[in-house]
Image: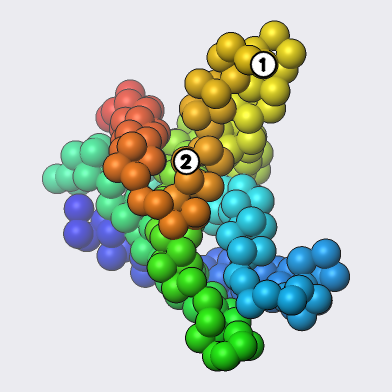
Amino acid sequence: MRAIYLRELGSYFSSMIAYITVGLLLAVLGLVLWVFPDFSLLQTPFASIDALFEISPLIFIFLIPAFTMRTFAEERQNATLEILLTRPVSPWQIVFGKYLATITWLFIALVPTIIYVFSIYQLGSPPGNIDLGQIAASYLGLFFLGSVFCAVGIFASSLTSNQIVAFVLAVFLCFVLYYGFYFISKLASFTGSLDAIIESLGIDYHYHSISRGVIDTRDLMYFICLIGLCLTWTWVSIKKRN
C-alpha cells in the first residue's frame, strides 16, 4: 500500500494538477474574503474568519471532484488498472493507498489558508482577539468534509473510464450529500415531523455542528462511517474487475 500511496502522490505533484487546484483554492478564497463586498472581511466590524468556512464547502463540491476524477478513470482508460491488479497488492490496498494520497493533497491545500487566519489575527482589536478554538474546530470539520468528498470522488472515478463523467457524477453526489437532505427536510410533508431527522442525515448538519466549536463524537463517527461506506463501494467496484 505504501508503494501505491507514494506512486499516486508523486503523480499528483509531478504534474500541474496539484499546484493548479491548490492555487485555485487560494485564489477563490482570497477573492471571497478580501474582494467580494458581500463576504469581504474589510467590510465587517468584527475580526472573523467564518466566511472562509461558509464558502469552502461550495468550492470543494467542484474542486475535489476535479482533482479525483482521474484517480481510477485514467487507470481504466489507459488499461493500467488491470496491470496494477496483477501486482502483489489487494484491491483494498489500491483503494486505500489512492485515498490516502488524495487526503494528503487535501491537507497540503488547507495549510496555506492559515495565512488568512493570521491576517484576521493581526486585524483584531487588540491583535489576537479571535476565537482560535472555534477556528481549529472549523478546520477539523472542513478536513473531514473534504475527506468525504475525496472518498466520493474516488468512488465516482472507479465507475467509469471517462474522467468528465466521473467529475459530473462526483459533483452530483457531493451536492446531494451536502445540500440534498437539507432541501428535502424543508418540504411541507416533512416539516414538524421528520425534518430534523432528515436534515441530520446531510453532511452540512454535522459540518456546521463542528464549526460551532463543539466536537461531538457523533459528528466524527458520521464522517468516518460515510468515508468507510464510499471506500467500500469503491473496493467492490474494483474487485469486480480483478
Secondary-structure class at tag 1: loop
- Mark 2 surroundings within 10 Å by alpha-carbon count, few (fewer than 14), some (14 through 19), many (20 or more): many
Amino acid type of the residue that numbered disc 1 sits on in the rendered structure: Thr
- Mark 1 surroundings within 10 Å by alpha-carbon count, few (fewer than 14), some (14 through 19), many (20 or more): few
Q: Outermost residue, right direction?
A: 37
Is residue 166 or residue 45 the one in the foreground?
A: 45
Determine whether label 1 and label 2 are within 8 Å by CB. Answer: no
Q: Quadrant of the C terminus?
A: top left
- Residue drawn at the location 56% of the way across and 14% of the way down: 194
Q: Position of residue 159 (x, y in %)?
A: 48, 31
Is residue 89 or residue 103 the one in the foreground?
A: 103
Q: Colour scheme in the image? A: rainbow
Numbered label attached to residue 157: none
Quarter residue 35 falls in: bottom right
**Vertical position of residue 22 compared to residue 238: above or below:** below
- Residue drawn at the location 60% of the way across and 52% of the way down: 57
Instruction: Give the side of residue 63 with respect to residue 6, left or right.
Output: right
Secondary-structure class at tag 2: helix
Amino acid type of the residue that numbered disc 2 sits on in the rendered structure: His
Which residue carries the number 1 mark?
A: 191
Q: Outermost residue, top direction?
A: 189
Q: Outermost residue, front direction?
A: 126
**Vertical position of residue 236 compared to residue 104: above or below:** above
Which residue carries the number 2 mark?
A: 206
Q: Position of residue 24 (x, y in %)?
A: 65, 69
Q: Earlier in the sequence, mark 1 or mark 2?
A: 1
For residue 82, say whether it is visible: no
- Residue drawn at the location 19% of the way across and 59% of the way down: 2
